[in-house]
Amino acid sequence: MKRDGIYVTGTDTAVGKTVTSCALVARARRDGRRCAGFKPVASGCEQTPDGWRNSDALALQAAGEADIAYEDINPYALPLPQAPEIAAREAGVTLQLDVMLAAANRLSAQVDALVVEGVGGWDAPFAEDIEQRDLARALDLPVVLVIGLRLGCINHARLTARAIVADGFRLAGWIGNRVDPRFTAAEDNLAILRRHLDAPCLGVIPHALHADAAVNAQYLQWPDPRPGLLSR
């Protein structure tokens, strides 16, 4: 299925992938697209009357189009806040790529654009036999890299960008996220990142606790919609 969308990854955990993904969903909607966020696997869920729910997936649901079933946004909701492979094992669940793709196709049928939020960094696997690149490849999406602006981000960003391109994907752009308000060298780091990353900066999200996705959307632009794979 042809889809307009992006695969959002990060340089590591806790760099603001969800904040950024929600803002990208809001950006797309602000530009006139019907858009939804997709969190194929979410670890660290709470039991609710409606079943297991993850706060990141709920944030994506709130940012996107109304009346979309949670199960389409987050087909695998795992209780343990650990790497997906560990969380799935503890829950007695076998993660399957076909299940993720089926949910993505159901979601794509309801919207114009899809924002897929990955787990951890680019090389964090979904399962023993499923890499994030497998899902991104099956969906044929370009990749957007979220960089948490803090000490060490330049090295992590350059290594991750190289890995994405080496895996055959188009890095459609990167977004800086001011995760540490005490990091006084953010502007200097941004200048170095702009010089060394062979992809456009799509925006920089300021540090703000509990910022609304629609507010953050004003700092971002939607990337070039060309397909994600550099070669077929």
Image: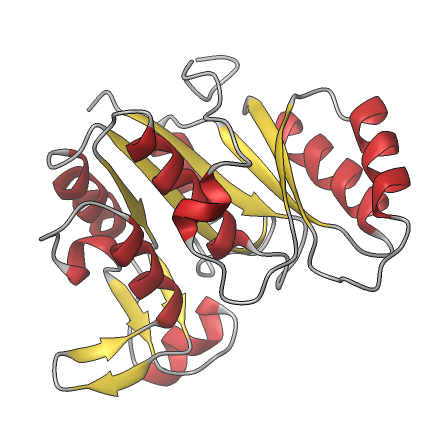
Between 225 and 22, which is closer to the camera in this rendering? 22
Q: Is residue 202 left or right of residue 23?
A: right
Question: Which residue is drawn at the image coordinates 69% and 33% (left, top)?
Answer: 161
Q: Give above or below for 169 relative to 103.
A: above
Quarter of the figure with the C terminus: top left
Q: Give above or below for 51 relative to 21.
A: below
Q: Give above or below for 48 relative to 21.
A: below
Visible in this render: residue 71? yes
Q: Give above or below for 33 relative to 226.
A: below
Q: Quadrant of residue 28?
A: top left
The percent coordinates of residue 124 (x first, y second) are 57, 56
The percent coordinates of residue 123 (x first, y second) are 61, 49
Q: Is residue 167 left or right of residue 21?
A: right
Q: Is residue 104 left or right of residue 203?
A: left
Visible in this render: residue 168? no
Between 216 and 121, which is closer to the camera in this rendering? 216
Question: Which residue is drawn at the image coordinates 34% and 61% (left, top)?
Answer: 59
Q: How is the image coloured?
A: secondary structure
Question: Which residue is drawn at the image coordinates 53% and 53% (left, top)?
Answer: 17
